[in-house]
Amino acid sequence: MSLKASKPEKFQNSRIEEVLLLDKRVVAIDFSGETMISSDMKDHIFDFSWAIPNGTAKESLLTCFRKMFRTHSLTYIESCNRYIGRLFAGGRQGELITLNDIQIWADNHRPSAWPFLQAILNRCQKLGLPGLDVELIAFLKSPEKFEEKGKGAYFALIVNDSKRGAFTEQELRNIREGVNRAYESGDLDTYYWALIWLLIGTGVRPVQIARMKVKDVIITSGPEGKEVTLAVPMAKGEKSANQGKWKRKAPSVLSEVLINYLNQQANKNPEDPLFADQSSKIANDLKVAFQSVKTHSDRLDGPIPIYSYRFRYTLGTRAIALGATDHEAARLLTHRQTVCIKHYRASLPSVQQPLKDAIGKEMSFIGQAFQGRLVSSLEEATRQHDSGALIRDFANLIGLPIGACGTMANCYQHAPRACLTCRKFEPFQDAPWDELLAVLQSDIDSEIEERIRLITVEQYVAVKEILNSIKTKDKESFK
């Protein structure tokens, strides 16, 4: 079914137009007022009164909406239209949308609303329609370039972007495991393997990697074997030969990867580039590398979009969530000042909730997998002396008790594993947690289905957190 380019005669003198919907219905929509469309037992309200008075940007947005009705659900379009309407609140003129307009809009909305506004703006930009400011177009194309601009709202939008912002716990874990699998199978070259791990472990910018030389990986002998210190060139500041370097001990996994990589690069001189010598080449190498790595995002239900700055945003948000000060986080991210770190911190609370809504307890910096209360025995439990409260592990620990249930409500979950992430679970301090941890690790290693693995991974994390709680309690008892 197709629509004529011109309006039917009865609509010639109005903003009412016939539009083809995704379900192949043809409906009349008032693009200057309110229209109700019923679908799936629900009424959808489309209020296009924001399009009056006319303006260049408004006309471009209406063009996008006309196309979206053919390709998207009514629920999705309704949300997009609602947030666009708020952008033009008060009958504001719509000749040009600027980045400052987005800043003001963002100050009054949760970041979870941004994807809807962003979808329409991106559509306008990709179609080359007029009405978007040059700076706004640049932001939509490369948001990472605005890392230190604005008052922080830009940054909140960037970090919360599901395709260009911080990775979720599930996504980062999937990337790590996928990269290692590809390397072990021979599908990923050592060069790409080391490059990806450098991004995971440090979150440095591509330009910094491009400036790194072989001599900037400093290998020394330590109490636990070989240790690696990285001398990362600062990216900001004047473009001079000596911009200063940031030195930091590399995480153990990254150290092993870099030592392995350099052992295969024995013919390189200390002054040779560690990887590619241009940031554009680094970005392209990352793109090439992930052609050999299979990834999956639960919240996107598809491959994980990979951009170098996503590793950076992930490192920054986690550092702050785990208690890093502004100065510590600034040094971690090689910022000369703490201005941008304040934006990280300011955006974090508003970023957490929409991510939590999307993936539940998958984000370790939002909510711990273990939600319960540690006790020493049944006598300390909520249901004291009630043998029915005991939770035993017959499958893995031959019926040994691992804790107590803090509720009398009927539970139909699979005990004891489901108990590990339950807020009513009261684990015993002296239960054989190390043995259970080993069982869970074995299950993770042998499970092929990714979604099932993630459930076990969450249980594994919960046990790790229980062990950490036990260590903390032990230290406090010695004080």
Image (cartoon, rainbow, N blue to C red):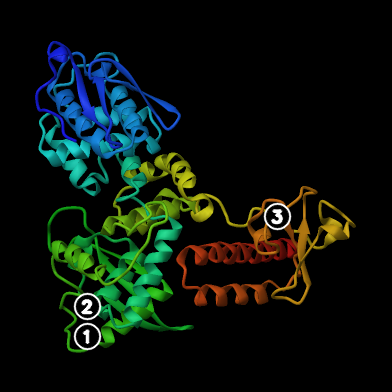
Indicate which disc, 1 or 2, sits on the residue closer to the N terminus.
Answer: 2
Question: Which secondary structure, mark 2?
Answer: helix
Where does the image place residue 373, in percent across and percent down from the top left?
71, 54
Q: CA distance from mark 3 to mark 1?
A: 56 Å
Q: Residue at x 67, y 51 (%)?
A: 423
Label 3 sits on residue: 412
Give how far across and how far down residue 90 sits, in percent.
Answer: 29, 14
Residue wearing tag 2: 214
The answer to whether any part of residue 150 appears in the image is no
Q: Are marks 1 and 2 in contact (CB under 8 Å)?
A: yes
Q: Earlier in the sequence, mark 3 or mark 2?
A: 2
Q: Position of residue 213 (x, y in %)?
A: 20, 74
Q: How much space separates mark 1 and mark 2, taking CA atoms?
A: 9 Å
User: Residue type at mark 2?
Assistant: Val
Side of 454 relative to 91 (left or right): right
Q: Nearer the viewer, mark 3 or mark 2?
A: 3
Mark 1 is surrounded, within 10 Å at the Cα level, by few (under 14), some (14 to 19) or many (20 or more) other residues, namely: few
Where is residue 98, by image quadrant?
A: top left
Residue 35 location, quadrant: top left
Amino acid carrying mark 1 in the image:
Gln
Percent of width and height locating residue 9: 12, 14
Q: Nearer the viewer, mark 1 or mark 2?
A: 1
Q: Residue furthest top?
A: 13
Q: Are marks 3 and 2 in contact (CB under 8 Å)?
A: no
Numbered tag placed on residue 265 in the rendering: 1
3 or 1: mark nearer the eye: 3
Q: Which sits in the foreground, 41 or 120? A: 41
Does residue 389 appear in the picture of this structure? Answer: yes
